[in-house]
Amino acid sequence: MERFVIIGAGAAGIKAAERIRKMEDDAQITVISIDDQVHSRCMLHKVLGKERTEKGINFVPENFFEVNKIRFIDTEAVTRVDTKKQEVTLACGAFVPYDKLLLATGSAYVVPPIPHFREAENVFGFRDLSDARAIQTALDTYGKNVFIVGSGLVGLDAASALTHLGGKVTIAEMADRVMPLQTDAYAASVYQAAFENAGCKFKLGVSANDSVVDDNGNIIAVQLSNGESIPCDFIIVAAGVRPKVDFLKDSGIEIERGIGVNEFLQTNIPNVYAAGDVTGLSGVWPDAMEQGKTAAMNMCGAVLEYEKPYPFKNTSNFYGITMLSVGKLDDKEEGVKICTHKGKDSYKKAFIKDGKLQSILIQGDISNTGIYLYLIRKQIPLGDLSEKVFNLSFADFYGYNENTGAYEFAG
């Protein structure tokens, strides 16, 4: 009986466990998680804002582990992986042997090296269910005047939840606009206006570089690079993440931007695989699930390459305004043709280079946009269709193949 051990119960880990069970009826599967329940990180802001219960963001059936005969070790940290003995050490001192190991521990928030930020008890991240619980407690303990570092997806998720609870939120962003990786100036302004209407304040083009603490060491004000001082009751940092790999020290597993893997999601160590955020390949939920599935199949003996994800793909929905952003939105890249369209409730921007779609931004109705993901991934020439780039469908790329006698899609 082969022993499969999965560290992490996020999208990649759970999908891998599910796939292994489908392929190996008699395998012994163990999932180890530091969390006390499975939960969707994408929905954490709904729990923080009390729009959903903790149970409501569990993305597997209540009896998932029992039905699939999976041993679930919850609320337990892994402290070491011995790749020579092929065993995992838990914080409680127990050992879990494996024949095949999947590392799917995800990533952790980074606290920037601002004076007092790493010591003060009223500084929080927003990555896991435990963080959401801690922030809810902070609202009752410290107050509702919140300072958020970073206006990316995580920072805005936290801000939207806190404003829903009556929080008074100030957000500092080093870039000149909100969500700088996913937006351009216009799309950012639409979201900024929506958040300001909800009560948020933004400090753009500045950084936090110092803080003021009280007698208990808690931060009561943040000093900005422009000289402003922003009073606060507590702080949320949302300005970067790093892979959770501290437990892999001395394991021999190669770590660069994340855990190094090949096209089969294998590490440099035999029988050890990695998937999800911890690889640094993609931080997007569907990509993590696909990685978990691919890694699991290879762990079971298949030979399946992982198809690289869409570059910088993100979707968002704040205050009823949806947005899809795929690729790098670089207005200054040489040789790029930029097409834009503004409607009453929509904004679209496409980046075309060498006759192929490279990136796209759509704010408003993002239904029926799968064609753009297909064109970007397959790099299919647009030809004359580039003139109607915002009105494309799969039908435009469906034609007769004279060699096979079949109708098929391009690419």
Image (cartoon, rainbow, N blue to C red):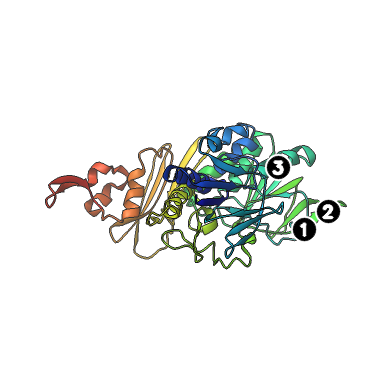
* Relative vertical location of residue 177 with respect to residue 67 in this rendering, above or below: below
Q: CA distance from mark 1 to mark 2?
A: 8 Å
Disc 1: CA contacts within 10 A as few (<14), some (14-19) or many (>=20): some
Q: Which mark is residue 135?
A: 3
Q: CA distance from mark 1 to mark 3?
A: 18 Å
Residue under pointer 1:
116
Q: Nearer the viewer, residue 123 or 256?
A: 256
Of mark 1 and mark 2, the one earlier in the sequence is 1
Badge 1 vs badge 2, beta-carbon distance below 8 Å: yes
* Residue drawn at (59%, 50%) of the image: 151
Mark 1 residue type? His
| Mark 1 or 3, closer to the camera | 3
Residue under pointer 2:
217
Helix, strand or loop at disc 3?
A: helix
* Residue drawn at (30%, 48%) of the image: 389
**In-image side of 399 versus 392 (left or right):** left
Q: Residue furthest front?
A: 1
Mark 2 residue type? Gly
